[in-house]
Image: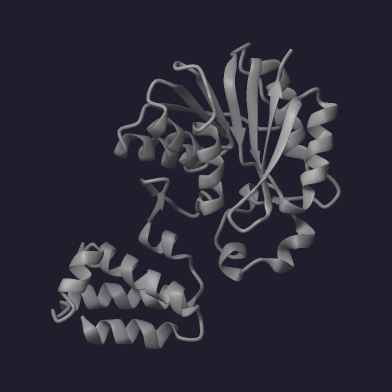
Amino acid sequence: MKLTIQYIEQELAGLYPPTEIEGFKRIIFESVCGWDFTEQILKKQDIISPNHAEKIGSIVLRLKNNEPIQYIIGKTEFYGLKLNVTPSVLIPRPETEELVEWVVQTKLPVNCRILDIGTGSGCIALAIKSQLKNAKVSGLDISVEALEIARKNAAENGLEVNFSPADMLNLNLDGEKYDVIVSNPPYIRESEKAQMHSNVLNHEPEIALFVTNEDPLIFYRAVAVFAKKSLCKNGKLFFEINENLSMEMVDLLSKSGFHHIEVRKDINGKNRMISCINNI
């Protein structure tokens, strides 16, 4: 195992920060060999089989081509859940875990109804359901491929969440009412692409990431209109947002008739989340 560790470190040196390479090593050995972190420490003197060595070499080659480790392995962790991910869905971020935390710590009815719009892998809906066992949770997405992944994640985690197809810009759910609506829609402007890493630009689905410079709040506006008529009285709307557009979001929600608008910073001190209340 020592020689394999050296191989990984040498091949990836200069391409990734040392802390990220450490993370890659743990993920690689767990995925290929089935060893958790403790076993990896205990087995440092063990010899890696030729079959495992070949698989590790393939993973390292793909990492050298800037492919995200989550897509290579086909799995990621989010809010204590193990989720399947493919290039059809975004890789869940730690910032989105903070949004989930905000929702689950909010005082809600025991049997509350929660809707996740633009669910992707189902990460938000499933994480909320894992914490609020009595909630009725649903997720919507326009992508058939994403919905397949979300349903697979629900089944493998033993969580009952209903996933259905829907266009975020044309939402109509026949008068259903919800206590919470949450969404992490596309919010990165085309002009901000230059600031992004190539592993995101070249591998993650553009449909889930980008909006035009001319109308960057298009999805938020559509969800806000839908939420205004679909939230119960005092129902709550939560969004993950573009850190550079927090004031524009406050203005949009205020003009849409929502109250108690609150912007929260993520762990990096960026304006990343917003919530409001529908009190009419």
User: Measured along the vertical axis of the image, is residue 29 above or below residue 125?
Assistant: below
Looking at the picture, tell me which residue is in the foreground, 203 or 3: 3
Q: Is residue 119 visible?
A: no
Horizontal relation, residue 47 to residue 61: left or right: left
Q: How many marks?
A: 0
Q: Is residue 54 left or right of residue 195?
A: left
**Residue 135, image x, y percentages:** 44, 22
| Residue 51 in picture, x, y percent from top left | 19, 74
Expressed as whole percent of the image width and height from the top left, the position of residue 232 reads 63, 14
- Name the residue: 21% across, 62% down: 34
Where the N terminus falls, by quadrant?
bottom left
Res. 160 image quadrant = top left
- Whether residue 139 can be seen here: yes
Against 272, residue 234 (above or below) is: above
Residue 183 lies left or right of residue 53; in this view the side is right
Task: Look at 51% across and 53% down and name the residue there.
Answer: 94
Q: Residue at x 51, y 40 (%)?
A: 101
In which quadrant of the rendered image does the C terminus lie? top right
Q: Quadrant of residue 117?
A: top right
Residue nearer the viewer, 45 or 83: 45
Query: Looking at this rendering, what residue extends furthest in the left direction?
Result: 46
- Residue placed at 32% from the left, 78% from the top? 57
Q: Position of residue 96 (x, y in %)?
A: 55, 47
Viewer-nearest residue: 89 or 161: 161
